[in-house]
Amino acid sequence: MSFKKIDAAGAAGGQPFDAFTLHGVLANQGAAYEGRARRAQVSFEPGNEPRLASALPLVGLPVVWPLSPGCEEVQASLLVAVADGAVRLRPVVSQGERDPWVGDEVALTSSDGLAQLTYNTSGFSGLVLLGVEVRSDLDDAEVDKFSLHETGDHAYLRSDTRVYLGSSANLALDDNTRYALRFGPGAAGEAHDPEFLPPATVFWWDRSLANVDEVDIWPPYSRAREESWLGASIEISVHKLAQMRVYSMSVEETAFRARADLRDALRPGMAPAARTLRQLHKRNYEQHLRTKVHALGGYPDASATDRQGDKVTAQGVAVPFEDLFIVDVGVFDASTTYTVTISGTAHSTSGQASAAATRSALRTAIRSSSDNALVIARLLGSSLVLSYRTAAQSPGISVSATGGTGTITLTSTAARGLGAAWVGHYSDDKGVVDGETGDAANRCSLRVAALLLAAGSPGADELIEPTLTARLRSFDSGAWTGDSQTATLGSGPVLCLRNDNDQARRSLRLLRYWLSNQYSVSTLIPRHGARWHTLRGMTPRWAFREPWVSIIEGAVTDAQPAETHRLLRLLMVGSEFNVEGVGGIEPTAPRLVECPTFTVWGSEEVRP
Amino acid sequence: VSFPSDTLYYQHLGAEADALASAEVSVALTIGGAVNEHEVALNNAHRAWTQGHRAVLGTWGQWPGLIDDAQPVLWTLDNTGSGSDSAFAELARAILPRATDRQDFTLYYDKEEAEIRVTVKNAATGATIGSAVTTADGTGLGRLQGSLGVTISTAVSTPVYLLIEAQALAGEVGSVWLMRIYEDETTT
C-alpha cells in the first residue's frame, strides 16, 4: 500500500466525487498507518559498544519507547558481533509494576551479524520499557581450574560475591573476554553439598593485575553455604562466556491493530454518516499522535572512567547523587573551624577531634534553626568532605573552613549531565493538525523520558528523588549559543536498596552496589579501588520494572523550531531526599543514580 | 470526475460539522471548489507519508557529562605519519531494518581537516549497496559544518547498515566534532 495523490489523474471515469475523495483519504490514511511507523536508531562508538554477556539471564539494552496508538508489535534489529559461543536473547517488555512480557529466544553465534527481536505490545499502551535479556553459553574448555577449600593457600569464598583463588592462582584475564565460574565435584569425587551453584558470571576483577587471584561473581553466594562445604572436595573452573557486542540498535513499530473497513460506509452516492466521518477523523488524529522519535539515548559516556582511570563502556551515565551537594574542604584538621552557611545563617564548629564529631556538631547547630537540612561529614582518605541534603533545591549553601585550608563555596544549584541528543528537523512535528505549510506552528514540544536506577549501600531502603531538567541549545555556524530554553521535566523516586536477607533483593542490591562502589564520589577525592565491572546497567528480569527502575517523563518546548540543529541536554539536579526507616542517613558509599537510556520524541500538540 | 451527490452531501453534514472540526470534514464541506484545492487541504496524510518519522539513524556528539560549554572532539584522526592512520577508520555503524521507500540519507557534520565516508551495506551479506564521501575541502579552512547526501540506487527490503568512516587529510591531524544521520524525506 502506498500513498496516492487525490487528483484528477487518479480518478476513474464517472466516479462520484464524494466516494472518490473519501476513499482516497481513507486509503492514504491507511497507507500512512501501516507504512509510516515510528522508528528510531541508536549507534555506539567503536570501542564503546555495549558488550553483553551473562551466565544467568540479565536484561540489558533498555529502551523507553512511546507506543503509537494501536501498535501491537515492535521489532528491534541489532547489528552485533558474537564471540566465544552462542548468546541467547529474549525480548522483554515491561510497564509499571506488572510482570514483564517475555518473548521467544533467539540464539546467535559468531556467524550472525544481525539479530531481530519481536516484542508483543498488544497488551500495552503509552510508555513501555523494552529490553534484551541475555544468556550466554559457557565454553566447555577450561581457562583454568582451582580447588576450593576453607583455609590455606586454596580457593575459598571471601564474601558473598568474592572468590579467592589462591596466592598462586596466576589467572590471566583479558579485558575483551568475558568469563564465568563453574562449580563441581573435586578430584576426591565427593561433595558434601550436592547443590552446587549454577554457573556464575565473573563480573569484577582487578584489571591492574596481570595475574588475578580473586574475582567477584554474580549471582552472589551465600557464605552460609560455605559452612557445609568444609572438608568438601570442590573444584572451581573458569570458562569463557559467550559475548555480544552491539554496534547499533534499531527499534521500529511493525504491526498495528486491525481497523474496520469504512469503504462500505462511504459508498458512492450515499450520504456518509457523521459517525463514519468521525471515525475517519479519529484515525487521522491518531496518526497525528504518532510523532517522530528524535533520539534514543543510552549512549556510552566516552569521558567516564572507573576508579582505575580506565575507560568505562557503560550504556548510559551514572552520577553520584551526593556530587550534587558535595564539597571537599581539604585535609581534616581538628584545629580548623568548619562553617556551613545556609541561606545566610552560619553554623560553625571548632575543636572537634574527629570528622564524626564535626558532623555531629554541625548537625546539632543546623537543626536548631533549619529543619530538613542535614550536613554529613566524611573522611575519605585524609580529606574531609561535607555534603548536605535538604528539602529545598536551592537553599543557598556555602561551606567554608578556616585555619589554613581556605574557603570553598559550594554551588548549590549544581546540575549533572545525564545525556544530550541532537534534535531539530521536526518539520513534521510542528503541532499542526491541518494546514499545508505548518505556518501556524511557531513552536515544537518535545517529550523526554529517562530511565533511572539507583545504586548504593544505604542502611535502609532509600527513595532518592532527583529532578530532571532539559535544556535546548542552538548550533549555528560551528558555535553553540546559550540555553534558549530550560524546562523541569519532573521528579521521581528512585529506589536505593539496603542489604536484605531476601536472596533476590540482596542479589540485585549487590549488582548495583558494585556499580556505585566503582565510581569515586567526586573528582576531588582520590581514587581508591581498582576494579572493573562487566554487568553495568543490567538487571534481572523481575527487576526490570517499577519500583526497581523508574521512568521520569516531562516536556520541553522549543520556541525556535526554525533552528535546524538543536542540542537537548538532559540534566539531573538534587531534590528532596526521602529516607525510609532509620539508620539510612550515613552513607558508607555514594548513592549513584544511573541513566542507562532516555528517549526524545515529538509531543502531540493541537493547534490553538 | 463527476459530482453527482455534492448537494446531498453538504446538506447532510451541515449540522454535524462543528462537532467534527476536522480538516477532512472541512474538505468535504467545500465541495464545489476545484479538485486541486482539496488535494492541498488533504495534506495531513501526505505529510505523514513524505516526512513522517524520518528515522534518526544515529547522532554523535552528545556529551553525557557536559555541564559547561566545552565541546570535546569526538574523534581525532592523525594522518601525519604512515601506515594505518592514512586509511579511513571506522567511526560507527548504524542499522536500518530496510531501505524501502527511504533510499536517501543525509549526514550532518562538523569537522576540520577530515573527510567522512558513508557506505550503505547489506547487513546480512556485507555487500556494498551505495557510498558517498565528503568533498576534499583542503587544509587551513578551519571547522566546516555541512551535510552529505547518500543515495541507494535501489530499494532494499532486507536490513542494511551504514558504515561511517573518516580519515584526516594527508599530512594533517583531523577532527570530527559532531555527526548525525537522518533518513531523507520521500518525494512521493
Image (spheres, coloured by chain):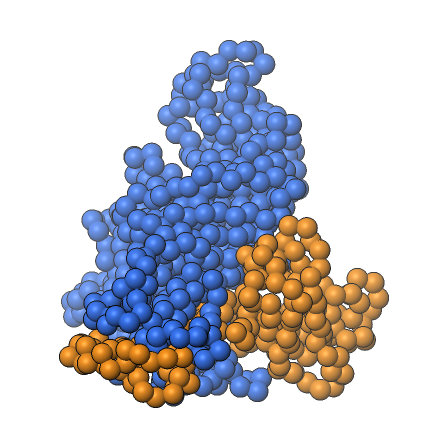
Q: Nearer the viewer, residue B116 or A547?
A: B116
- For this view, does A503 lie left or right of residue A214? left
Is residue A37 depicted above or below A118 in this figure? below
The residue furthest right is B82
Q: Nearer the viewer, residue B175 or A165?
A: B175
Is residue A205 depicted above or below A222 in this figure? below
Is residue A322 depicted above or below A461 in this figure? below
x and y, in percent, of residue A19 in the image: 34, 71
x and y, in percent, of residue A332 in the image: 40, 62
Q: What hue represents chain B?
A: orange
Residue A125 seen anywhere in this rendered image of the structure: yes
Q: Nearer the viewer, residue B18 or A69?
A: B18
Q: Residue at x 71, y 59 (%)?
A: B128
Q: Residue at x 60, y 73 (%)?
A: B107
- For this view, does A170 lie left or right of residue A201? right
Q: Nearer the viewer, residue B73 or B37?
A: B37
x and y, in percent, of residue B162 in the image: 63, 62
Quadrant holding the C terminus of chain A: bottom left
| Picture quadrant of residue A18 | bottom left
x and y, in percent, of residue A152 in the image: 54, 23
Residue B46 seen anywhere in this rendered image of the structure: no
Q: How many marks?
A: 0
| Picture quadrant of residue A464 | bottom left
Q: Residue at x 49, y 69 (%)?
A: B54
Q: Residue at x 30, y 35 (%)?
A: A502
- Provide the letter of the chain coloured blue: A
